[in-house]
Amino acid sequence: MFRDILEKDWKVFKELRIAALERLCEKILIEARAQIDDPGKSSQEKFLAIYKLVNDRNDDIARGFDDFRRSTALMQIGIIHKMGLFTAKELARFSPEAQKIIALYAPIPET
């Protein structure tokens, strides 16, 4: 399948993974706040909307962040990138070899 991640890329990923997870959680909390603040919904409707949101986003977290291993790192980087959780500057920190694989998931913007 994919080749092993280079040590340099692994170190970068370990650092950027934390920032990406924080960004995703912040997005989820903003979405939840929007549901809570919706004056057109009853409390039950808000609860159900948040329940669905958390279930759906938990799947996103699982795909991009669970099973943190070197053997799955390049795939996870690609998935996290496809979710829009890395900046162009952050992606530029990866090696050209890693960037080729990451670009298979979504185009990498110019820095």
Image (cartoon, grey):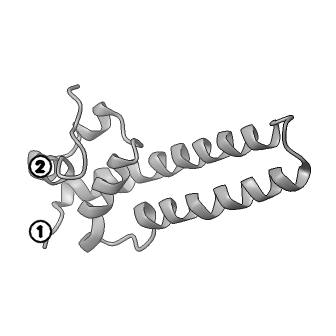
Q: Is residue 65 above or below residue 110?
A: below
Q: Position of residue 58 (x, y in %)?
A: 57, 63
Hey, which quadrant is residue 56 in on the image? bottom right
From mark 2 to mark 1, how far is it between C-alphas? 12 Å
Question: Which residue has dot 2 on it?
Answer: 100
Q: Is residue 26 left or right of residue 12?
A: right
Q: Amino acid at mark 2?
A: Lys
The residue nearer to you, when weighing 51 against 25, is 51
Label at residue 26 = none
Q: Position of residue 102 (x, y in %)?
A: 21, 51
Q: Which label is found at residue 3? A: 1
Q: Secondary structure at mark 2?
A: helix
User: What residue sits 78% from the left and 59% below the top?
Assistant: 48
- The mark nearer the N terminus, 2 or 1, is 1
Q: Nearer the viewer, residue 55 or 67?
A: 55
Amino acid of disc 1:
Arg
**Residue at 86% in and 34% down:** 39
Residue farthest front in this picture: 40
Secondary structure of residue under mark 1 = loop
Q: Residues within 10 Å of mark 2 (few under 14, many from 20)?
A: some
